Image: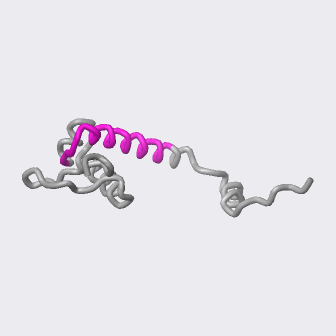
Amino acid sequence: MAEKEKKPIQILRERHGGMSEELKGYFKNQNQLKKKITGALKSGPKTVPEISKEIGEASSTVMWQLMAMKRYNEVYESGRNGRYFQYTLKGESE
C-alpha cells in the first residue's frame, strides 16, 4: 500500500518542529480571554470598561480582543453608553 502524500502544512510543521510552547501558551490565553468576553456579553450589551471590570482584565486587552472579534463578525457595536460603544454578540438580540 502506498504511503499517503503529505500536505504542505504537514511538511512545514515537520521541518520547523511544530508550534513552540510559548506560542501554544499565547493562543491558549487568547482563547481563554475570548471565552471570558463572550461570557460577559451573553447577559447583554456592554462597554469595554464594563467588560474589563467584569472579567478582571485591562481595558486595552479587552479592546484588542473585541476588535479581533468584530473583524470576524463575532460582535458588533450596538449603540452607545455615554462616550463608549456597547458591544453585543452576533446573533444576540439583533
Q: Is 32 colored magenta in this rendering?
A: yes
Pinpoint residue 13: horizontal percent, then vertical percent. Answer: 66, 56
Q: Which residues are magenta?
A: 25-47
**Left or right: where 3 falls relative to 23:** right
Q: Residue at x 32, y 49 (%)?
A: 91
> Along the line of sight, which residue is nearer the eye, 15 or 87?
87
| 30 displayed left or right of 20 | left
Residue at (67, 52) in percent of width and height:
17
The residue lying furthest to the left in this view is 82
Q: Is residue 14 left or right of residue 3?
A: left
Q: Where on the picture, by quarter, is residue 50? A: top left
Asked whether 88 or 48 is in front, the reply is 88
Q: How many numbered circles does the render carry?
A: 0
Confirm whether the magenta stretch covers residue 71. no
Q: Residue furthest right?
A: 1
Residue 2, position as x, y percentages in the image: 90, 56
Q: Residue at x 32, y 51 (%)?
A: 90
Measured as percent of width and height from the top left, residue 29 is found at 42, 42
